[in-house]
Image (cartoon, grey):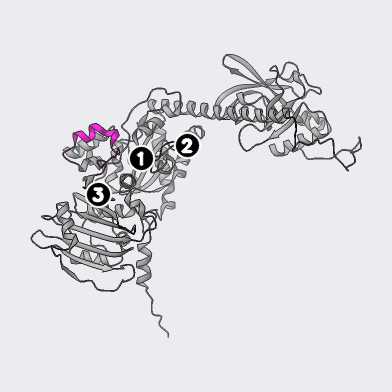
């Protein structure tokens, strides 16, 4: 019998874990989580670069420090010596390996104020996985001693970690305070999402400061609501300043009263994610002017029996622009776009982990019976967080490994929340404003696009020289088809096939509209030249043409009536109400009193109200040209 000796390559594992990240900013998440797990009240971060643009990070906290077992776990792999039990955020012993991706790593710590600070160091820690490390007393001349005094940690327990010359490719992000503040607010323990269950952020702070009974509803066994003061000194700043209070920062500008009330306790400045304070906006005519901010869950409604907790809010565009000044939008430089951050996030310990907007869209469809798919398709107005302690995080905490098995439960919980929200008058009014604003924006865009296409077609027609123009009737070398020749074709089964049939007909017969330009990628399908002016009451040489396989009541056209002059279809179904988009923007499909074309292929029309006047869109039915096919249709 042959025994196989198992081969463990610890060096490769250490190197892999040290590089196992999405962003260099993850060191802030790990440091804040560890500081909170170790009882810290204050955390310091200092970043700097040298003349060769090498970046160094200093991390410190006033927690309980690291004894020998914790130091052994820190310098080892896969070990954790945290005493917090279920409340501990970190437990795998992988996160701090991010610190190993550097030229030199130093750790100074003490667990008793009566003892001296002691230090351990290792050069190239990502390559020296099995080397024992000496722990020695920290000398007063050591640079770390000066840093400890500068932070006021001289009479405290805690830990100070110096990461020299980090090897991260995106290490320049460690030198930008706005990126760090935004990341800490969104992806770390100080941005606790339970603040979104309160009407105002200041109410969350007051509840923590007073120890209100309402806090008992916030599942404190899963995450302690204890503020941590985070002080930053980024890229040459002269002093440490709390998050949101640094030089030239406007991070907390939307919460002036909040910061004034708790000025003596700077930990509360940065604690709790920065949701916009609740506000019922007035009926803004444009999405960009909507100042609404609505809670869909409260401390009484945010949990399920399956262990799922949901913080759900919606916020209008203007509310977002006025609140999240570090976001970026057109003409405004920032750290992130609303589409990148907003929507639905899966959480563990109430810290966002991974974006799953597909679950939110599925829940919206189910909760509304798909009636709001068009109106709520863009999720930039949504801030939804789903926390579940059964989520198993990947090594770098950037995803959930068992999310598929919990997706159905998450969607069911979301559907319950959304169905209740749809009963709420304030939410109903917000949805209606969003519907109307979205409708008008899309309508304006399509009208402008079709106007431009009309103008370009007219310019081409009016050009004195048409270098790229061709005349299909003037072909060299090909004989004409005999008069009795006919090509047997299948009836079209799609709009593309319909357009092909129409093109063949137009090449042999005088069709009422001569198509000049066709583009079905966006907007109405085609621009055509009107051959029979009697077809339209509006006199115009060029018309906007939409091709549809079938036109029938209750089937949306998916374009705006104002952007269409004529519809060409294969067949017409039942008459009645017909819509532009989904169930929005209505007209009537009916028979015309009298067709004007010969043969009478314009027997139907769509009529709708256009600013108090009735506007008519003729419908040309191609199947009527084929009696044997038209006769089979069921009216």
Dot 1 alpha-carbon crowd within 10 angstroms: few under 14, some 14 to 19, many 20 or more: many
Q: Which residue is labeled 2 in the image?
A: 378
Residue at the image point whose x is 39% and y is 45% from the top: 345
Residues shaded magenta: 242-265
Q: Is residue 54 above or below residue 633?
A: below
Circle nearer the viewer, 3 or 1 = 3
Q: Are marks 3 and 1 in contact (CB under 8 Å)?
A: no
Instruction: Give the residue furthest to the front.
Output: 51
Was residue 255 drawn as part of the magenta stretch in this picture?
A: yes
Label pair 2/3, CB-CB below 8 angstroms:
no
- State the CA–CA distance, disc 2 to disc 3: 38 Å
State left or right for residue 565 relative to residue 310: right
As helix, strand or loop, the secondary structure at mark 2 comes to loop
Q: Is residue 39 left or right of residue 610?
A: left
The answer for how far apart the CA atoms under marks 3 and 1 are is 19 Å
Indicate the position of residue 487 as horizontal and vertical percent values: 84, 40
Whole-Å distance between the Cαs marked 2 and 1?
21 Å
Image quadrant of residue 202?
top left
Give the image location of residue 582, x and y in percent.
Answer: 55, 30
Reading the image, the residue beneath label 3 is 233
Q: Farthest top residue?
A: 612
């Amino acid at each position: 019998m042959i025994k196989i000796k198992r081969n463990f390559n610890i060096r490769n594992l250490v190197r892999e874990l040290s590089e196992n990240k999405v962003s260099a900013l993850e060191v802030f998440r790990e440091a804040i989580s560890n500081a909170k797990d170790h009882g810290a009240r204050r955390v310091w971060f200092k970043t700097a670069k040298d003349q060769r643009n090498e970046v160094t990070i200093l991390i410190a906290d006033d927690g309980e420090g690291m004894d020998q077992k914790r130091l052994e776990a820190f310098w080892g792999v896969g070990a954790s010596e945290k005493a917090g039990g279920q409340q501990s955020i970190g437990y795998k012993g992988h996160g701090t390996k991010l610190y190993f991706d550097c030229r030199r790593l130093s750790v100074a710590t003490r667990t008793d104020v009566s003892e001296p600070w002691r230090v351990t160091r290792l050069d190239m820690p990502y390559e020296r996985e099995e080397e024992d490390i000496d722990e020695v007393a920290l000398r007063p001349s050591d640079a770390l001693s000066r840093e400890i005094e500068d932070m006021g940690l001289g009479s405290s327990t805690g830990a100070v970690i110096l990461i020299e010359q980090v090897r991260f490719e995106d290490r320049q992000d460690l030198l930008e305070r706005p990126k760090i503040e935004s990341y800490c607010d969104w992806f770390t323990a100080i941005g606790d999402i339970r603040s979104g269950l309160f009407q105002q952020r200041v109410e969350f702070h007051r509840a923590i400061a007073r120890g209100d009974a309402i806090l008992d509803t916030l599942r404190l066994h899963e995450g302690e609501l204890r503020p941590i003061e985070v002080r930053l000194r980024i890229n040459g700043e002269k002093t440490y300043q709390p998050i949101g209070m640094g030089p030239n920062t406007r991070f907390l500008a939307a919460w002036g009263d909040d910061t004034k009330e708790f000025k003596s306790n700077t930990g509360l400045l940065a604690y709790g994610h920065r949701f916009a304070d609740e506000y019922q906006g007035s009926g803004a005519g444009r999405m960009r002017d909507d100042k609404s901010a609505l809670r869909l869950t409260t401390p009484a409604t945010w949990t399920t029996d399956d262990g799922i907790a949901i913080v759900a809010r919606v916020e209008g565009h203007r509310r977002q622009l006025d609140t999240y000044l570090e976001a970026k939008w057109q003409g405004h430089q920032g750290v992130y776009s609303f589409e990148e951050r907003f929507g639905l996030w899966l959480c563990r310990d109430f810290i966002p982990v991974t974006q799953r907007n597909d679950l939110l869209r599925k829940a919206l469809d189910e909760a509304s019976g798909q009636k709001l798919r068009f109106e709520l398709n863009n999720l930039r107005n949504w801030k939804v967080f789903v926390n579940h302690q059964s989520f198993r995080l990947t090594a770098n905490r950037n995803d959930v490994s068992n999310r598929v098995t919990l997706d159905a439960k998450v969607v069911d919980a979301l559907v319950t929340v959304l169905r209740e929200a749809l009963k709420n008058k304030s939410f109903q009014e917000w949805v209606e404003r969003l519907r109307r604003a979205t409708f008008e924006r899309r309508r304006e865009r399509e009208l402008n696009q079709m106007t431009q296409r009309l103008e370009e077609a007219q310019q081409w027609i009016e050009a004195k020289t048409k270098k790229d123009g061709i005349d299909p009737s003037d072909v060299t070398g090909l004989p004409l088809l005999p008069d009795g020749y006919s090509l047997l074709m299948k009836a079209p089964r799609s709009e593309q096939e319909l357009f092909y049939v129409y093109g063949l007909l137009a090449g042999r017969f005088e069709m009422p509209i001569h198509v000049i330009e066709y583009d079905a990628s966006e907007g109405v399908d085609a621009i055509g030249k009107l051959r029979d002016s009697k077809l339209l009451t509006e006199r115009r040489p060029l018309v906007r043409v939409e091709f549809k396989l079938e036109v029938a009541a209750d089937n949306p056209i998916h374009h705006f009536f104002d952007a269409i002059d004529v519809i060409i279809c294969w067949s017409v179904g039942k008459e009645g109400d017909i819509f532009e988009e989904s169930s929005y923007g209505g007209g009537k499909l009916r028979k015309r009193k009298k067709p004007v074309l010969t043969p009478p292929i314009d027997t139907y029309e769509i009529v709708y109200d256009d600013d108090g006047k009735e506007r008519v869109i003729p419908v040309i039915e191609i199947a009527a040209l084929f009696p044997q096919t038209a006769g089979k249709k069921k009216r």
